[in-house]
Amino acid sequence: MPNRSKTPSGAKCGKKHSKYIARHQARNLLHAVAFADQIGLRLNVAVDINWLMFSGTVDDRTRFAQCQQRLSKWAKRRGFALTLIWTREVGKYGSPHTHVLIHLPPWLMQSNEFQLALERALEPEGGSNHEKAIMIRPAYRPLGKLLYNLKGVDPKHASGFGIRPAYQGEVLGKRAGCTENIGAGARRKASTTREVEPTCSGESKDTLSTGISSGNSETRVQNGRIPTSKFVASDAHSVARRLQPHEVQEKPPKKDANGSDARKTELAVPPAEVIAGAIELYRSDKRGRWSVGNYLPSGRRRAYSFDISYAEVQRLLRLLWPKYIADQKRTADRCYGGDVSRVAPSWRPGLEAALDREAKARREFGARREKWEQRQRELERLRRQRMSPEQRRELERKEHDERMRVLSAEYDERDLRYARKTLLDIKLAISKGRSESQYRHLLDGIAAAGPDGATALDIAYIAVVRHVRGLRLNPPDEVERWGNDIAQALAARGLVCAIAPDRFIRPGHKGVT
């Protein structure tokens, strides 16, 4: 037999050149974006890499593959799975580029820790030699950014995706791809898990798709229970339908015997007594099992750690209720001939498990956030140590000015509220005929004005003796209107009289009858 281990001369090697992004690759990336939203790993950061501005001779495909392996270990150490989508292209003058959409947790988005990790991951094959070699920006609309990155799609398929095509050069190897946790295999496995669920469980596709907890930002689809948590993502089926309305078609809802939506019939609402029982179950906890706690043992307030409210308890109960109803029906059909009244209630264990998962997710989030803030404070301290004394004094002066500005604004707002309340109280006391002790200082001030009298503005400022600055923050016409209203109320009771349209005086002075 001929030896096939050797490649004949002139034969093509396994590496292929491509000019466009294939249709199946573009569809795969669009579904990957939707699935990332479903599992709570939204692609919220965009990274653009210009390989022309890197040193070394390694090709861009090998560079990015090695970088992806190192970033995966970095992300695993920080408690989340690396999730990204990448596309390769060649610029107008032959410079290779790679566009990446990646998921970063909120506590890493506001710091430069990811940029440092990315630079370290690219360093072994040759680091960057220009400040614009790596561009990192927030991706507020991941779908729009992905559609732009897919501009190198085959022109004959571009209209089907709503993309304006543009030739992006000839690339050796794969042009686009994504990580395995949002790839076709992971999506197929997740859809199979949903299909294996019993149809009588009463859980709709939307309810199952929201069973994602972000305590560690991983998919947790358990058989027979919903890992409910505060930090959940929307259903990926609706996202995919929005991405490709002509390709992804949702199955029509099932109809019952009356012709109505059977899924709406199954999603029953828990009665009021069950909701009250759930709140009482949460309130009766004495061990702090579901109390996340907002304070540390030292007495300092914990950052970003929230207690579970009664509204959250009701939300968890509503999510678990359809499965509870389905379990009751199944048990009644199997053991009691369909008599549901003979089945003992069993919603409490499910609610307790959901509360445990919710409290755990919140505690983990609070711990990560606290660790991140501690790291930020340490970085800020080190940064100030590297500053010169002049720079440090200038920074401290700016921070002091900012604190004084905030305090001044708070004091102004407090004085303004007090001044308005005082004017309203005096006006009501005069009009209701109450004791003169509330506005005695006002009458004394008008009397001290002498025979020339006091204007409406003077009356308003006399009424608010301690917080005159609060009135000065108001427009003069508004202050004058308040003073005129008080003067009219005093004149109606005969306590002052008008000697001019805008001047008032106390009776008893010379020339005043």
Image (spheres, helix red, strand yellow):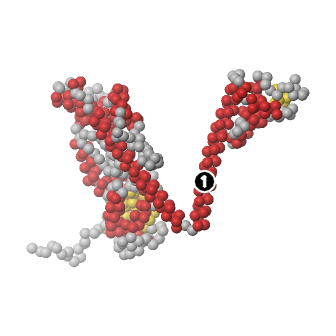
Q: Quadrant of the N terminus?
A: bottom left
**Vertical position of residue 77 compared to residue 62: above or below:** above
- Tag count in the figure? 1
Query: In this orientation, which residue lies closer to the viewer: 162 or 148?
Result: 148
Q: Position of residue 3 (x, y in %)?
A: 13, 75
Q: Is residue 151 visible?
A: no
Q: Position of residue 236 (x, y in %)?
A: 34, 46
Q: Position of residue 327 (x, y in %)?
A: 24, 33
Location of mark 1 (residue): 402
Looking at the image, which residue sits at the far bottom? 9
Q: Is residue 253 left or right of residue 485?
A: left
Look at 62% across and 51% down and name the residue there: 404
Image quarter for residue 129? bottom left
> What kind of residue is marked 1?
Glu
- Secondary structure at numbered mark 1: helix
Looking at the image, which residue sits at the far right? 511
Q: Quadrant of the C terminus?
A: top right
Q: Is residue 231 left or right of residue 9?
A: right
Q: Is residue 298 visible?
A: yes
Looking at the image, which residue sits at the far left? 1
* Crowd tier of the residue under label 1, counting other residues whose Cα lies within 10 Å: few below 14, some 14–19, many 20 or above: few
Look at 64% across and 48% down and name the residue there: 408
Query: In this orientation, which residue lies closer to the viewer: 428 or 120?
Result: 428
Q: Position of residue 48 (x, y in %)?
A: 43, 63
